Image (spheres, rainbow, N blue to C red):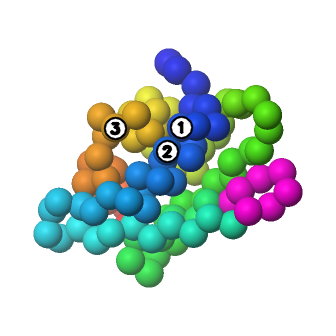
Amino acid sequence: MPDIMTEDAEAIADKLTRDTPKQPDHQRFRVEVRSGRAHEIVKVWYGEQHVAQYGIQRSSKSKPHNYIAAQLHLSRNDAYNLAKCPLDVDSYITILEDKREI
């Protein structure tokens, strides 16, 4: 199973910010990114509900961020697929609904 690297963590935040769900009963995610000295903190809301939060380490080298999967309520494989595009925002919303996170 591939590692979730710094670029993947950033791609997930970008995807959740940028992509609009296609299913009419799904809402758009709201993502807030706060920068610190060594980390960026990414907070994710679905409607008014806070659903996830994770940190992205800043460094000159890309580092594994495998802990992000659990914070997004996903398997590591699903989190990697969310970053790399096979898993779209509608599928992520469905996973969250199935796990009763939203």
* Neighbour tally class for label 2: few under 14, some 14-19, many 20 plus, Cα within 10 Å: some
Label 2 to label 1: alpha-carbon separation: 5 Å
> How many neighbours does mark 3 have within 10 angstroms: few (below 14), some (14-19), or many (20 or more)?
few
Amino acid type of disc 3?
Cys
Residue 14 visible here: yes
**Nearer the observer, 66 or 35:** 35
* Disc 2 target residue: 11
What is the C-alpha distance between the residues marked 3 and 2? 9 Å
Please give the residue where the numbered disc 3 appears in the rendered image.
Answer: 85
- Residue in the picture at 15% in, 62% down: 23
Q: Nearer the viewer, residue 70 or 80?
A: 80
Residue 22 position by quadrant: bottom left
- Amino acid type of disc 1? Asp
Q: How many marks?
A: 3
Q: Which residues are magenta?
A: 35-41
Q: Quadrant of the C terminus?
A: bottom left
Tell whether position 40 is magenta: yes
Residue occupying the far bottom of the picture: 48
As drawn, is 1 to the left or to the right of 35? left
Nearer to me, 3 or 34:
34
Residue type marked 2: Ala
* Label of residue 27 in the image: none
Q: Picture coordinates of residue 89 (x, y %)?
A: 31, 53
Q: Secondary structure at mark 3?
A: loop
Q: Are marks 3 and 2 in contact (CB under 8 Å)?
A: no
Residue 8 is tagged as: 1
Q: Which residue is outermost to the right?
A: 37
- Characterize the local packing of mark 1: few (<14), some (14-19) or many (20 or more) Cα atoms within 10 angstroms: many
**Residue 58 position within the rendered picture, expressed as x and y whole percent measured from the top left:** 77, 44
Please identify the quarter of the rendering in which residue 85 is found.
top left
Secondary element under disc 1, as helix, strand or loop, is helix
Disc 2 to disc 1: CB gap under 8 Å: yes
